[in-house]
Image: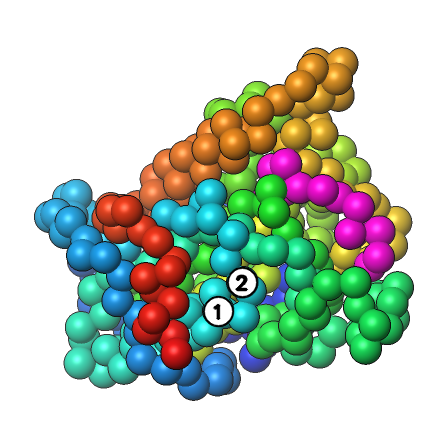
Amino acid sequence: MALLPSPSSSLCHHRAAPFVPAAASAQARPRRGTLRVAAAGARSSPTAAPMEVRPAAAGRRRCECFDLHQQIVPYAEAYAWQKSIVKRRIGLLNSGEDHSDTLIALQHPPVYTLGSDSNKEYLHFSKEDAPFEVHQIDRGGEVTYHGPGQLIMYPILNLRYHKEDVRWYFRSLEEVIIRALKSAFSIKASRVDSLTGVWVGDQKVAALGIHGSRMIVYHGLALNVTTDLTPFQMIDPCGIKDRGVGSIKQILQKESHGRETDDTLLMDIAYHSMVKEFAELFQLDLDTSPDCNFQEIRKFLC
């Protein structure tokens, strides 16, 4: 059994390991973790619209899916939402009742987030006079940017039911993105040795960052779909000074010699491809919350 490598797993600086898919183990009994990762407490879990619960596919673990991929959700509220789910899930561990993983998909308004031990030298502005909101949070890694047009996916998984290895989990998230870009857009993406994330050439199109407690991991990934990349110029994304960032829209326009794209359609295609690959790779049976609306979820975060 592999242990969590550090109290906060880095957004950028884990050395890449070969990707090896884990066998489906949804019916295996969870094992007690040997290393705890600190996570702050949170309020009780929100309740969204009633979900259509259906029997899980044979050999697959259930995963509740909150589809907000066309909605702009304030960062602080999404962060509180994640932590409330994690708190509930940790409370279910000892009784063996943690029967479902969670996936949240959304977008954020412009915001910079910094890992718990991030270095201010990677900011090209003063935090007191920042162009957008700045949040220092409990993931590892350095500064990154989130904004409209960027598909955010927050999986909250119990790795005891998958593989108790955070490096494997990083590689798996990268694999989801690589497969989705190839199947939906015929974009050939790859990893870069010694860095996390997904790259097309020397441009980073997706960043990863997580935190975990008792083998329940949260935070996740950010995929630049139609994102305005200008705000990245105000930082050294993930502390990397010698490489750039890119987006799906930018890549497609370059390949089509500037042909216009439908931003809403691109986001829809990216979301559906990502969710499909995520469910297949992690062997999960997704239950999508019907008519999911953050206005309703927000009531339970007060």
Label total for image: 2
Between 233 and 4, the one lying in front of the other is 233
Extreme residue in the left direction: 55
Q: Is residue 43 left or right of residue 125?
A: left
In terms of secondary structure, where does tag 2 sit?
Answer: loop
Percent position of residue 163, x then y:
38, 60
Three-letter amino acid code at the position of disc 2: Pro
- Image point (18%, 75%), residue name: 96
- Marks 1,2: beta carbons within 8 A: yes
Disc on res. 37: none
Q: Is residue 2 above or below residue 39?
A: above
- Image point (17%, 81%), residue name: 95
Residue position for label 1: 77
Q: Which residues are magenta?
A: 223-235
Q: Is residue 43 left or right of residue 284?
A: right
* Res. 4 visible in picture: yes
Percent position of residue 37, x then y:
49, 81
* Res. 114 visible in picture: no
Q: Quadrant of the C terminus?
A: bottom left
Q: Is residue 18 magenta?
A: no
Residue position for label 2: 74
Q: In which image quadrant can residue 139 be found?
A: bottom right
In terms of secondary structure, where does tag 1 sit?
Answer: helix
Three-letter amino acid code at the position of disc 1: Glu
Q: How is the image coloured?
A: rainbow
- Image point (66%, 41%), residue name: 227
